[in-house]
Each structure stands twice: as C-alpha cells, then as structure tokens.
C-alpha cells in the first residue's frame, strides 16, 4: 500500500512514471521495458488515490502524440 500525499509521490514510487505538466492531472507509466506507455488520470480522494487508465500505446505511438502536443488532451486512443 502506498501513502501518497501529492502527485510527486506517484513518480517517487514508480521510477517509470512521468507526470504530465500543463495543468494536467495525468501520469504516464513506461511499461514492459518502456516498450509501451500507459496514461492514467489520477484523483486524490479524502482517503484514497484513484488511478484511471485512459489508454495504452506503444512507445512509438506515444512519441507521435508528443510530436503534435496531444499527450495532454487525448483521453482515448
């Protein structure tokens, strides 16, 4: 069980996690040796933190999204 107080704690727990900036409440995890990227929305509740999977794509597909600045806005892929 993790004891997270803020989004930075997610990144500290998972070394492959990158918090998306730009006022986003999203985190991207590198999975399967960073061959895939999983984007999640996080929500800090009163006693729990919720992670909602938005999409899973290959690293190459994620790079294409980043090239056109869509990593912040795409919720379904």
Image (cartoon, rainbow, N blue to C red):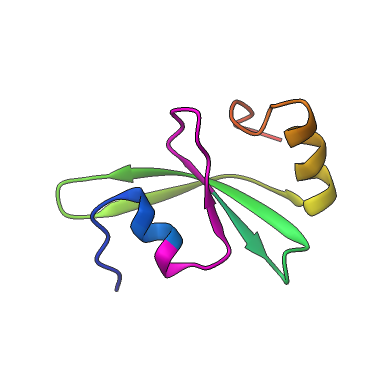
Q: Please report the residue visible at 71 percent of the width from the left and 35 percent of the height from the top.
A: 77
Residue farthest along the left direction in this orientation: 46
Q: Quadrant of the N terminus?
A: bottom left
Q: Which of 34/21 is in front? A: 21
In this view, 30 is above or below 69: below
- Image location of residue 47, percent across then percent down: 16, 54
Whether 18 is among the magenta residues is yes
- Image location of residue 25, percent across then percent down: 42, 36
- Image location of residue 50, percent across then percent down: 35, 50
**In the shown orientation, is residue 10 left or right of residue 16?**
left
Whether 77 is among the magenta residues is no
Q: Please report the residue visible at 66 percent of the width from the left and 65 percent of the height from the top.
A: 31
Q: Which of 63/53 is in front? A: 63
**In the shown orientation, is residue 62 left or right of residue 47?**
right
Q: Please report the residue visible at 45 percent of the width from the left and 59 percent of the height from the top.
A: 11
Which region of the structure is painted magenta? 12-27
**In the shown orientation, is residue 63 left or right of residue 3?**
right
In this view, 1 is above or below 57: below
How many numbered discs sit on the rendered protein? Answer: 0
**In the shown orientation, is residue 44 left or right of residue 36?**
left
Q: Please report the residue visible at 40 percent of the width from the left and 45 percent of the height from the top.
A: 42
């Amino acid at each position: 069980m993790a004891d997270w107080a803020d989004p930075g704690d997610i990144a500290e727990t998972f070394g492959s996690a990158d918090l998306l900036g730009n006022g986003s409440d999203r985190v991207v995890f590198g999975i399967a040796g960073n061959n895939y990227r999983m984007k999640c929305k996080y929500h800090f509740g009163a006693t729990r933190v919720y992670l909602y999977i938005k999409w899973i794509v290959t690293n190459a597909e994620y790079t294409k999204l980043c090239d056109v600045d869509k990593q912040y806005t795409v919720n379904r892929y």
